[in-house]
Amino acid sequence: MTQPELKDISPTELEVLKVLWQQAPLSANDIVEALNREGEWHEKTVKTLINRLVNKGALGFEKDGRAYLYFPKLAEHSYQRKESLSFIERVFGGKLAPLVAGFAGSNKLTEEDVAELKQLIDAWEKEQKHD
């Protein structure tokens, strides 16, 4: 999946992307239906969001008879990585430790979170030794 140069994705546009990351391709009506399982979305609003995402290069489409089927051109993990790094840079001056310390200090880290962080650090250390 090629990654487009991204302009900012709004929170409502992100909801459309989340639907398509779970299942694609989908028609605009299918996207509206999926979003309406979680809340109330107007068809016109969703179609506007889809068009914005197409214009930003985050969605692609193919014609299927009289309908258009939409699919993400932006991978979920790429979006998460970009947004995570942006957040850490803006809020924590690019340093990850204060973020983790904040979660640890407020007891928001579960045992599973700690185990996963340890695995990530171990894997990173092994990779650094081989470079």
Image (tube, grey):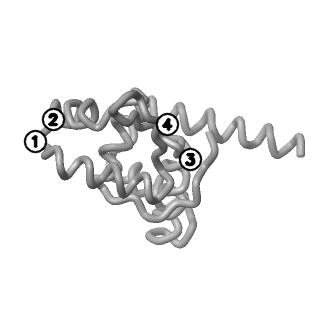
Determine contact: label 3, label 2, CB under 8 Å: no
- Check disc 2 and report its element: helix, strand or loop: loop
Along the polypeptide, which appears first: circle 1 or circle 4?
A: 1
What residue sits 24% from the left and 34% below the top?
29
Determine contact: label 4, label 3, CB under 8 Å: no
The residue carrying pointer 2 sits among few (fewer than 14), some (14 to 19) or many (20 or more) residues within 10 Å by Cα, namely few
What residue sits 36% from the left and 57% below the top?
52
> What's under tag 1, amino acid-wise?
Glu
Tag on residue 36?
Answer: 2
Tag on residue 17?
Answer: none
Q: Nearer the viewer, mark 1 or mark 4?
A: 1
> Which residue reaches farthest left?
40
Along the polypeptide, which appears first: circle 3 or circle 2?
A: 2
The residue carrying pointer 3 sits among few (fewer than 14), some (14 to 19) or many (20 or more) residues within 10 Å by Cα, namely few
What residue sits 46% from the left and 46% below the top?
59
Q: Nearer the viewer, mark 4 or mark 3?
A: 3
- Check disc 1 and report its element: helix, strand or loop: loop
Tag on residue 40?
Answer: 1
Tag on residue 78?
Answer: 3
Q: Determine the CA span between mark 4 and mark 3.
A: 23 Å
> What's under tag 3, amino acid-wise?
Ser
Left or right placement of residue 28 versus residue 40 in this view: right
Residue 28 pos. (x, y %): 29, 38
Determine contact: label 1, label 2, CB under 8 Å: yes
Residue bearing mark 4:
114
Q: Nearer the viewer, mark 3 or mark 2?
A: 2
